Amino acid sequence: MPKMTWEDLEDIAFALSEKYPEQDPSYIRFTDLHKWITELDEFGDDPKKSNEAKLEAIQMAWLEEYQENR
C-alpha cells in the first residue's frame, strides 16, 4: 500500500483521529501537528514539503472528524 503524502489531507486526518481519539485538534500547535503527522506509520512524504496551509487543512479535517465522533 502506498504511503500517504501531504496531499492526502483526509486520510491523514483520519489516521490522526484513530491514533489520538481523545485529542481535540483545536488545541494543537502546528509544530506538534507536523511531528505527529510525520511519525504516522502510514506517512511517507518529505517532512519539508509541508506548509502552514496544508497543516491548517489537515487540522480542520481532523476537527471535523473529531466532532462527528463526539
Image (cartoon, rainbow, N blue to C red):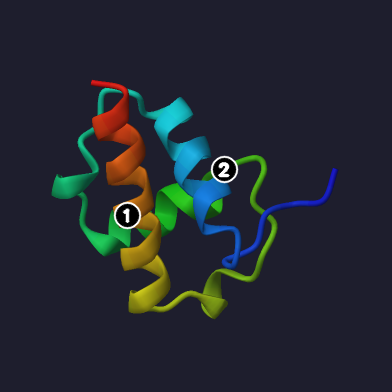
Looking at the picture, how far across and down is residue 60, in whole percent? 30, 55
Give the structural element (helix, strand or loop) at label 2: loop
For the C terminus, give its image quadrant.
top left
Q: Which residue is mark 1?
A: 59
For the N terminus, give its image quadrant.
top right
Give the structural element (helix, strand or loop) at label 1: helix
Looking at the picture, how far across and down is residue 19, in whole percent? 45, 28
Nearer the camera: disc 1 or disc 2: 1
* Residue projecting furthest to the right: 1
Above-or-below relation of 46 to 66:
below
Q: Write the residue at 52% across / 37% down.
A: 15
Relative depth, front residue between 29 and 64: 64
Q: Earlier in the sequence, mark 1 or mark 2?
A: 2
Rendering quarter of residue 45: bottom right
Q: Write the residue at 65% across / 62% down.
A: 5
Q: Write the residue at 49% across / 38% down.
A: 14
Q: Are marks 1 and 2 in contact (CB under 8 Å)?
A: no
Left or right of residue 2: residue 21: left
Amino acid type assigned to the residue bearing label 2 in the image: Leu
Q: How many marks?
A: 2
Q: Write the residue at 59% across / 67% down.
A: 7
Left or right of residue 15: residue 26: left
Left or right of residue 43: residue 47: left
Rendering quarter of residue 17: top left
Above-or-below relation of 1 to 70:
below
Looking at the picture, how far across and down is residue 53, in whole percent? 36, 77
Above-or-below relation of 47 to 40:
below
Relative depth, front residue between 10 and 37: 10
Q: Which residue is mark 2?
A: 40
* Residue projecting furthest to the front: 68
Amino acid type assigned to the residue bearing label 1 in the image: Gln
Q: CA distance from mark 1 to mark 2?
A: 15 Å
